[in-house]
Amino acid sequence: MHGKENFTTVVSMGGSRDQVNKRHKSRFSSKSSRHLHRTSIKDKSLIAKSEGNNAKGARAARVQRSKMIRDQKRAALIKEKRELSGSRNPPRVIVLFGLSASVDLDSLAEDLLSLLSKEASAVVSGTVASSEYRTRITVLKAPHGDLLSCIEMAKVADLMAFVASTNSVCEGSDSYFVDSFGNQCLSVFRSLGLPSTVVFIRDLPTELKQRNEVKKICTSSLASEFPEECKFYPADTKDELHKFLWLFKEQRLKVPHWRTQRPYLMAQKVDVVSDDGNSGKCTLLLTGYIRVHNLSVNQLVHVSGAGDFRLNKIEIIRDPFPLNSRKKQDLMDSDEVHGTEVTSSLVPDPLKLEPLLVENIPDPLAGEQTWPTEAEMAEADRDKKQKTKKRTLPRGTSEYQAAWIVDDTDEEVSDGDNEDDDGMVLDEEENEFHGQDGNKYLDFDGDEASLKFGDSDEEFDADSVMMEGDDLTKEKIKDELKEIKEAHAADEEFPDEVDTPLDVLARKRFAKYRGLKSFRTSSWDPKESLPQDYARIFAFDNFKRTQKHVLAKALEMEQENTDGYVPVGSYARLHIRDVPCGVASKLCVIAKSVPITTCGLLQHESKVSLLHFSVKKHETYDAPIKSKEELIFHVGFRQFIGRPVFSSEFINTDKNKMERFLHPGCFSVASIYAPISFPPLPLIVLKKVEEDGAPVVAAVGSLKSIDPDRIILKRVILTGYPQRVSKRKASVRHMFYNPEDVRWFKPVELYTKCGLRGRIKEPVGTHGAMKCLFNGVLEQRDTVCINLFKRAYPKWPNHFFPLTDI
């Protein structure tokens, strides 16, 4: 204490300044706080005020922004509710689907319609406008057992109402309330994308306690089959249905995303008008409400199952189901006098009309070689003069002596070159197999593996003539081959194994195939040796960019240009031109039980290209599905006939292996020639079991991409069996039956089922046996294989649409 006082006294004697001690430096202090003492008091006050003002301003901006977003959401919700109760939106479609055959849908539909409309005469084709509930509803009954009708109704449903009966007991199914057909349809509906769903429970007991118990059992049994937001309603009395309708009119419905990209119309009336000037063609009239988007009279439309067509005109008709009772009375009076009243009509503009292009018309002379010009011929002559002919001459021969030597050696060399050129060439830049007899070792680059083989022939001295003394006939060869196949039945893990024919040369039978050193890294030109069908299809430089541009352009045209567009919710009649009379008559018959759907097409969607779908075999289908079989593809609202080729997809390569069959339990890629459709779109694949029978569900999936350059390779495996084995060298037979075939396939790499790799050295004898070298000791029970590949393509269908006559 005394020392401190002395220190203070000394400092005060040095001047008039007061002592200012340095603040303690805290461990977590910031740099600004450490230098705070350097700032004047005036500046401190200014800084504090500005910081406070900034904080208050930022907070106010955040509050204002959140309030603005909240108001926008509230306004959008109020607008949506007004539209739901107004006449601008088309009637909501409720599809009643019975989960079992014992469910009575007729009585349920009658109860719903009677609640919505007091007058039975006001119900037309299941559509009714209710002024009490302030809504318009179309009720459809899905016929149990008719798969096609159920699929078409599910595509247009705004609400799927599944009806379960407590009296139905389905023992053969996973649930007591769902039968086998119900389970099949549920899986198909999930693949299409379920809209908003509810479950009606019928035939509940009258006693309250027992009623609650049965309802609880039914709910718990069916809850796993439907989405979490699905609600269960008892539906035995009109009071219970009244509660459902009161909630339904305010419900926000969800539909699959693929249904929100294109306008569509569910036809409530189908008529046909014949064209006098065009024989075999007629005009199809479809009447219904325009949904989701505005429909342009200039765009193309697709009639489900019939094909793509142009519109002749669109007539906007006065709404037959208005919510306003005064308008309804005026409409009834006008219909009695004038019939159906057309308020306006739209005719396509020739300058804006979308062209109906399906196939590209190829030019047969486009790939022909033209006659060379004089400059090209002169250049060829100069190149010919510059080329020097290779000759094999003795060492020390002068030019004068060489002029007198006959070119026998040249002929021998050229013959040898031609013989080498006749062999199969690997799909690589350099071929390391030709002329390897003088090499000490041989390296293989496939899949980062290097194999070194000895070139000693001492072990083959006894085997060189092993086939010469054998007198083998075709019968003996077949019998021996059959025995070997039976012995190797346990190793049938390679589904691509093919037997080499005995009466046809292998180099002719597999002339279109080639060998690959590595399936992953070897190159394959996607434009090489394309079939004639590729000249008929269209391709995109950048498919994703084109899709983005097309969707943005369609939205912009709909928002800016109102001329030529029919607004959403309008009751319109489409005049579809140039429809074949046979197709139109079939549509009139189908329309009695199935709703006919017409959707507008986006740009380019009528053109044919190569579509790739990700598909999975349906669990209810047991029969094999072979590649290039004729199948029916339901892609969104559209239907195609396709003959697909199946393939597995690999991530680390641009090549994909073809599959001869669609295997159950795993996803494959199905590629078909079909009109372009922009994803995302669901897929249901149907197959006809009998000629006149109804098709059944074979597979489900979705549209993956559109790419004609996708490489699909078909693989065949030729197998041979060791005759005599000597360490790493063996004599293999039954892979080929001709020594010329052995020389032809000499460049291709060998491998065994036990994991060894090797190469062909030379043929032995005259029956196709061969010497082979391997990178390890070969076992007698092993099998020697060769992989050959060729590019595979789908088949062009006879007709693209199911209802089109061949």
Image (tube, rainbow, N blue to C red):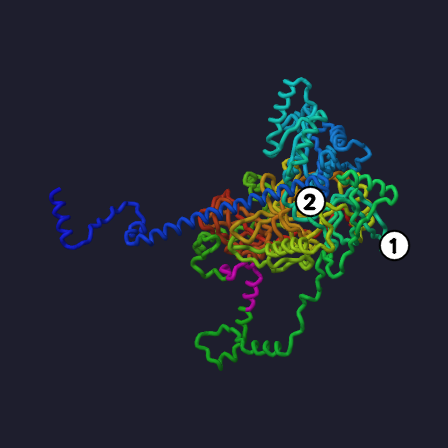
- Is there CB contact under 8 Å for labels 2 and 1? no
Residue at position x 64%, y 79% in the image: 374
Q: Which mark is residue 165?
A: none
Instruction: Report whether residue 503 is seen.
Output: no
| Residue pointed to by mark 1 | 276
Query: Is 740 situated above or below 722?
Result: below
- Within 10 Å of the Cα at label 2, are there few (<14), some (14-19), or many (20+) other Cα atoms? many
Q: Alpha-carbon distance for marks 2 and 1?
A: 34 Å
Seen from the viewer's position, the closer of residues 765 and 262 is 262
Near mark 1 (Cα within 10 A), the count class, few <14, some 14-19 or many ≥20, is few
Residue found at the very far bottom of the displayed protein: 400
- Of residues 339 and 64, the one nearer the viewer is 64
At label 2, the amino acid type is His
Q: Is 416 within the magenta?
A: yes
Which residue carries the number 2 mark? 634
Give x and y (percent) for residue 565. Answer: 73, 53
The image position of residue 63, as x and y in percent, is 50, 45
Left or right for 120, reference 460: right
Residue 421 appears left or right of 338: left
Q: Residue at x 84, y 45 (%)?
A: 340
Secondary element at image label 2 = strand
